[in-house]
Image (tube, rainbow, N blue to C red):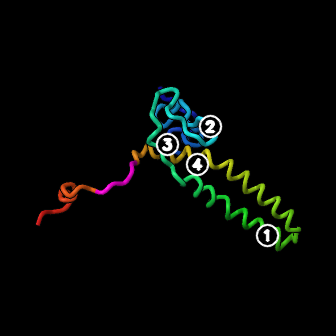
Amino acid sequence: MTTEHGPGARSPFGLGIRGLCPRCHQGRIFAGFLRLAERCDVCGLDLSFADPADGPAFFTMSIVSFPVVALAAWMEISLGVPLWINLAVTLTLMFGSCCALLRPLKGWLVCSQYINKAQEGRLAAPDEEAGDRPRQ
């Protein structure tokens, strides 16, 4: 049932940027631009486990902000362009870059959660802790 779609297609990153199901590698995980589907349309994988939270936004802001701020500073210092041109160029570039990166990064995080079996953190029960430590 699995299909290879090129180099890295079975990695969380390769699957995520394509928006493919991490289990069957064929179905889609998105039902909209950023809205996750409830289930994979091919294998029926329940995607309710997926909770990338603010991860995609954090990575997108980190990747986009530094080059755009550097460009804005360079345009201001070296070229001396008017403020409105600087804002028009940098805000357009920032908005476009963020929109282009959000979906692939969200797909990557969802696929990573499934492939790496990520779960919500929980406190260990006292009897579980005792099993990890040598008895005194």
Residue under numbered circle 4: 105
Q: Kindly identify the amino acid type of the residue bearing the numbered disc 2.
A: Gly
- How far apart are the two marked residues, 2 and 1, measured between alpha carbons? 37 Å
Q: Which residue is mark 3?
A: 111
Please name the residue shown 49% across and 32% down the image. Answer: 39
Mark 2: secondary structure: loop
* Label drawn at residue 32: 2
Work out whether mark 4 precedes mark 3 in sequence or the reverse, and give the earlier one. 4
Circle 1 crowding by C-alpha within 10 Å: few under 14, some 14–19, many from 20:
some
- Residue at far bottom of view: 77
Amino acid type at circle 3 is: Cys
**How far, Cα to Cα, is label 2 from label 4?**
15 Å
Which circle, 2 or 1, is nearer the viewer?
2
Q: Mark 3 vs mark 2: which is more N-terminal?
A: 2
Q: CA distance from mark 4 to mark 3?
A: 10 Å
Residue at 62% across, 37% down = 32
Give percent across and percent down for residue 23: 46, 34
Which of marks 4 and 1 precedes in the sequence?
A: 1
* Disc number lying in front (1 or 4): 4
Q: CA distance from mark 3 to mark 2?
A: 17 Å
